Image (cartoon, rainbow, N blue to C red):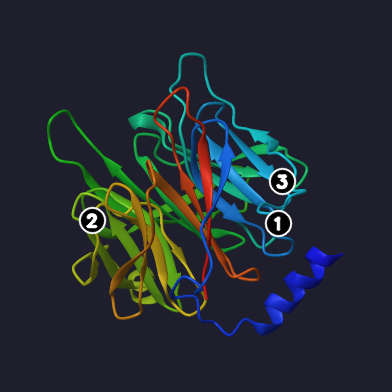
Amino acid sequence: MKRRLMAAIAMTAFVAACGSVAPGTSVQTVPLAGTPNGVAVRDADGAVFVTDDRTNGIVMTTHIGDEDAPAFSLYARIPAATGERTGLSQIAFAPNGHLLVEQFGFGMSSAIYDIAPSGQVALASDTNSARRRLGLLVLDGGTFLSSWFTKEGSAPAVGGVSVITRGTAPRQVIERDIVTGLAKPVGLAAAGDTLYIGDQTANRIYKVDLQAARAASAPVAASDVFAAVDAPDLLAAAPDGTLYTKCGAHAVCSVSKRGRATVIADGFESPRGVAVDVARRRLIAVDRSGAPNKPSALRVVPIK
């Protein structure tokens, strides 16, 4: 009861000011077994969902950060063929409460899966499996964006962003490229009609007019640099337009509406996905361990 009351108070008091760490607070570390990458928070109750490359699945907990918080449990396992390398990228909620998650694919088996609230897994797209998919942004129940790149031998990676529209027939999917000229686009986020794309190789976050790109007869080139960030990863956006992402090897940054990057938490072993928990005024960030004897973790960063 107390937890629900505090969440309700937080939502009432929230005035779309998520740009910095709340003063006088500290970052909390929550151990997490496995090899996490993407993270998402369910707005209604603050439940946290995390992709785990070790099991090729999604784990969840109803809440974190409290003494009585339950342990993470398996929510769904994504099917993988025998001998296939596992790796899951971004995870996001659709308006109907379903989860969408991307499978990276390593140039052979990328895909986007749909997970129902019951945990049932279905293929959401049968798009180009040779594209290594990373960022995922849900626009509505039937449309989402995917960032991807391809790499042939020693040639530089070539990437872009596509819009994917579910068709009316089962498994009918239409994928159309809307942004090109990228190397390794990872994170995607949107604020209003502006699409933000984090290119890890270029050390930049680009901005694109989303509606104009979708309406254009040919893909637009990413050329408008919004911010310079060292090796950005998956992105998250707050309601006021502030962005959050990995910056450098061991930190997470906020990026203001003017494109200024500020470190808000450091000391990570390997930061990955981030998610804004609006109601509870906090950022959930993945810290992935590279050592077999050291667990990974989620870092809970209070934000204003």
Image quadrant where residue 52 sits: top right
Disc 3 packing (10 Å; few <14; some 14–19; many ≥20): some
State whether residue 120 is above or below residue 159: above
* Residue to which mark 3 is pinned: 116
In the depicted view, which residue is nearer to us: 166 or 235?
A: 235
**Of the residues shown, which amino acid type is indicated by label 1?**
Gly
- Name the quarter where the N terminus is drawn: bottom right
* Residue to which mark 1 is pinned: 97
In the depicted view, which residue is nearer to us: 82 or 7?
A: 7
Q: CA distance from mark 1 to mark 3?
A: 7 Å
* Outermost residue, left side: 155
* Outermost residue, top side: 83
Q: Pointer 1 and pointer 2: residues touching (CB < 8 Å)?
A: no
In this picture, residue 56 sits left or right of residue 13: left
Q: Looking at the image, which residue is at 62% across and 81% down?
A: 14
Q: CA distance from mark 1 to mark 2?
A: 34 Å
Which of the marked residues, 2 or 3, is nearer the chain's N terminus? 3
Q: Position of residue 198 (x, y in %)?
A: 31, 58
Disc 1 packing (10 Å; few <14; some 14–19; many ≥20): few
In this picture, residue 193 sits left or right of residue 258: right
* Residue to which mark 2 is pinned: 230
Q: Position of residue 40 (x, y in %)?
A: 57, 53
In this picture, residue 233 sits left or right of residue 111: left
Which of the marked residues, 1 or 3, is nearer the chain's N terminus? 1
Q: Position of residue 13 (x, y in %)?
A: 66, 83
* Outermost residue, right side: 1
In the depicted view, which residue is nearer to us: 148 or 214?
A: 148
**Of the residues shown, which amino acid type is indicated by label 3?**
Ala
